[in-house]
Amino acid sequence: DSGVTQTPKHLITATGQRVTLRCSPRSGDLSVYWYQQSLDQGLQFLIQYYNGEERAKGNILERFSAQQFPDLHSELNLSSLELGDSALYFCASSGIGLAGTDTQYFGPGTRLTVL
Amino acid sequence: TQLLEQSPQFLSIQEGENLTVYCNSSSVFSSLQWYRQEPGEGPVLLVTVVTGGEVKKLKRLTFQFGDARKDSSLHITAAQPGDTGLYLCAGVGRDSNYQLIWGAGTKLIIKP
C-alpha cells in the first residue's frame, strides 16, 4: 500500500460526458502528479501540482483540467469524453516535488472506460 | 524532445534464466529511475541512478547507468515468476523542466 488513494477504482461513462477523478496523497506529501496510461503502454505525464499551485504541465488536453485543494487532495476533471480517453489514470505523490530526486508513490489508479 | 526507448518491448522466459532489458536515449539524463508495475497496480520505484557508470544491486536485480548518462540497463539473474511485470524506466533530462520522461516499458513474463 503506497498510501496514495484514488477514487473511483472503475468508471464507465459515455462519449461527451464529464467525469471527476479524485486523489488523496500520502500524508505529508505536498506534490501530486497525474498520469494517463493506455493499454500496456508507458505513462504519459499530464500535470503536477505542488502545495496547491500548478508546477508543470505535460501532454494534458484542453478538455482536461485539474486542481489541488488546501487539504492537498487533487481532482482531475475530464470533459467532452471521447473513446480514446479510455485508459488508466494514475495519481502519484511526492514530498518536495522534484522529479528524479523525490520518490513518486503511485495510487492504484482509476480505470476509465468511455463507451 | 528527449525520448527514452526501452527494449525489448516484450520478453517471455523460463524461470531460472537470466535477462537484460535496456533503456536508451540520444540525450543526457541527470538521473534515471526504474519502476516495476504489476497488473492492476501503480508503478513502484525500484532504484534511482544518478552518476555515470553507477551500478546498483537489489537482490537479483542489477541496474547500471551508462558512462555518458544516456542509457541504462536492468539485469535479472535467475528470474522468478514473481519478477513478472511491466518494467518502466524514467529519467530527468536537461530540457524536461525537472519532470520525468517515461519509456514505454518492457513487459516481462517469467514462466514457472
Image (cartoon, rainbow, N blue to C red):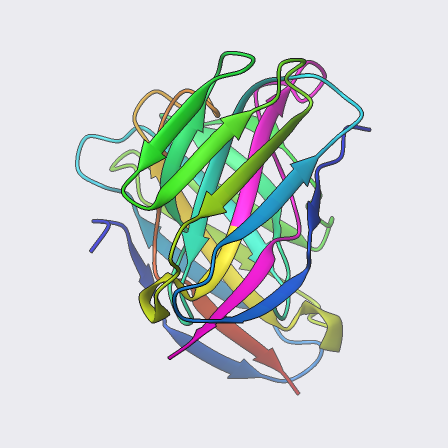
Res. A97 image quadrant: top left
- Residue at image location 33% in from the left, 60% down from the top: A6
Q: Is residue B78 left or right of residue B30?
A: left
Q: Is residue B61 left or right of residue B89?
A: left
User: Going 51% across and 41% down the picture, which residue do you hit?
Assistant: B74
Q: Is residue A75 above or below residue A48?
A: below
Quarter of the rendering occupied by the N terminus of chain A? bottom left
Q: Quadrant of the C terminus of chain A?
A: bottom right
Residue B28 in the image, given as x and y percentages of width and height: 70, 17
Front-lying residue, A75 or B75: B75
For the record, the magenta segment spans: B88-112
Q: Determine if residue A52 is in view.
A: no
Vertically, is B62 above or below B88? above
User: Which residue in the rendered view is the most extreme toward the bottom?
Assistant: A115
**Where does residue B15 sit, x and y in percent of width and height?**
40, 70
Point out residue B61 in the picture as x, y percentages from the top left corner.
Answer: 38, 43
